[in-house]
Amino acid sequence: MRYRPDIDGLRALAVLPVILYHADIPLFGGGFVGVDVFFVVSGFLITGILISELDEGRFSILRFYERRSRRILPALFAMMIVSLPFALALMLPSQLKLFGQSFFAIVVFASNILFWKKVDYFAAPAEESPLLHTWSLAVEEQFYVIFPILLWLLWKLGRRYLIGLIIVLSIISLGLAEWASSRFPGPNFYLLPTRAWELGVGAMAAFWIRRPSHLARPGLSLFGVAMILAAIFLYSDETPFPSFYTLLPVLGAALVVLYGANSVENPPTKGETRHDNLAAHILCNQPMVFVGLISYSAYLWHQPIFAFARLSRLTPPPMGMMAGLALLSLLIAWLSWRFVEQPFRRPERRWLSGRQSIFAGSAIGMAAFAAIGYVFVSFNGFEARWRANHQDQPALLAGLDYHNSRNMYDQFVSGGCFFSGGSASVPKSFEHCFNLDPERINYVLIGDSFAAQYAKALEEHYSSAHLVQLTISGCRPIWNGQGLGMCTDLYKTRIKRFIEDNAEQLGGIIIAAHWRSIELHDLEHTINWLHGLGLKTAIVGPGPDYGSALPEILIKASDHESLSSTNRFSAPERWRVQEEYRGMAERTGARFLPIMDYLCTPDGACQNFTSDGDLIIFDYGHLTLSGTRDLIKAHFPATLVDMFSSASR
């Protein structure tokens, strides 16, 4: 397959938004779609090479995997080696343990499965995981374990059914992605079955372009560029992905590879590049082609650079610093491309040119990284050494262990009424949560995990009443909102119907969530609907949001400032959001519980420890059980009658 500069330009159009998105640069809210563009380009190029070799009778599975090894492993291994000392210097034991697990998962091309399992609702922020981005490499390599062999078999046994089978399998994969996007967003994002269709679109393009009647169509190529740009600038983290929304950048990339200026089989004359149209001007100019050439290394290096920068600081890096790090990642990418990628892809030294050398070196490297990962995991991220240096901070150590503590279980798991499944239907294990107690006052707690955190302490504080806890992970308690199907379906149907049918038996509704400005109008609509049923409501306002796990922030800060309170880490917009919700509560007649006022002083300093010396918050914003007990005892009304006495019907 001859060289096409417009495809390198397309690679640049893919990698630059990814880097800017991960750098938190404004306007690039959909920059993550660059990964989907990469999938299409990969499927197109790899399938094109395989078709040519099969057509000419020179296909070799060993040659294919040799090419993949030369392309993928040297730069990947270099990035992993350089990351090691930074990880040892900057990461906490739990982070180092995951880092070690990542090493093992990467070399067996299963990091997508690892991160699907490990990056959960209460986990450390994804942007602090230096190897998280390797999930996409795992998806590709899993695809290429199966695809070349399938292609070879069908080429031998039934070539005429080949394209049809790819189309059918891709449609099934896309349908699965759309279905899972609102039900199982985690596995939907990370796993091959819901990503395979994107590589399949690239593969279909590789077949389509070989038709004798194929012509370059600059207008379609330009339209493809516009589709990709639209997704980059219009999509956000709230966009279900992958899903039908992913068709926009994927089909855009397909149009570029199919109808770009250099897509026709009659090649340009020597030294000529066809760029007499706007799409070619965008993609074939020298800066874009250069970035495209180094795009693989740029993708590899930017994430660890950003992650270690964040890990080295108490507060998020400013935008100017992140922009500078983005430029640094391109410089390091060029060095990686020039001195690591190129020598292995186009070897001049004999010891690099042999297939056996590449396979042996790859095996040794994989074994070495797997061994390093094993050591990190076996020593639990070198926890013993780390704990020995922090014995004077037991509360912080307990905060780091909170996810595995009995209090965490009692707070979020034991009652069985914090629903975190991926189904829009209520499981049988959740049905008991809808039971009412005819002998006591019944009141309902609805919301996400920021509501569930209060359930245990509310039961203890209002022990004479019966709590009906209906909380769903990641779901704001609003009737007419948009988002995960699991959320909208459960709140709009099962929970809303339960409240409507039992309104006369309920003493009131307590509503809590990780509030944002965007939900304000929808919550107001929900409150008015509840008041229309004659129910009284109480809104628990937003609390501090530290961006990273508070125990980790305080450990980093412990050498040079007091830990009793701090006003340097909590996101300042939480005050603004609180005032927005306070105003809405006043308009609707709901009682408002201002958590920021309870935990923070007017100058913005937020309390970190309870009266017993325990941490109040165990991650970026969720309260510990001790924290909720202290808060409710000190600031919530003594009885439910008092709770709802100032709330209007």
Image (cartoon, rainbow, N blue to C red):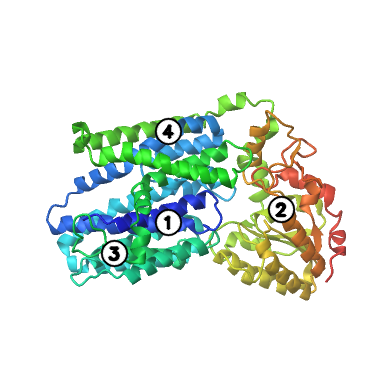
Cα distance in 3D space between marks 3 and 4: 39 Å
Of marks 2 and 1, which one's residue comes earlier in the chain?
1
Residue 151 shown left or right of residue 526 in the figure: left
Give percent across and percent down for residue 41: 33, 57
10 Å crowding of disc 4: few (<14), some (14-19), many (20+): few
Q: Quadrant of the C terminus?
A: bottom right
Give percent across and percent down for residue 235: 51, 63
Residue 442 shown left or right of residue 310 in the figure: right
Q: Quadrant of the N terminus?
A: bottom left
Q: Are marks 3 and 1 in contact (CB under 8 Å)?
A: no
Cα distance in 3D space between marks 1 and 4: 25 Å
Residue 152 vs 207, above or below: the answer is above
Camera-side mark, 2 or 3: 3
Give percent across and percent down for residue 34: 42, 56
Residue 558 vs 76, above or below: the answer is above
- Say which mark, if any, is on residue 34: 1
Residue visible at 65% across and 58% down? 448
SS under mark 4 = helix
Cα distance in 3D space between marks 2 and 1: 31 Å
Task: Name the residue nearer the viewer: 502 or 474.
Answer: 474
Of marks 4 and 2, which one's residue comes earlier in the chain?
4
Task: Name the residue nearer the viewer: 464 or 531.
Answer: 531
Q: Which residue is mark 3?
A: 261
Cα distance in 3D space between marks 2 and 3: 50 Å
SS under mark 1 = helix
Of marks 3 and 1, which one's residue comes earlier in the chain?
1
Q: Which residue is mark 4?
A: 82
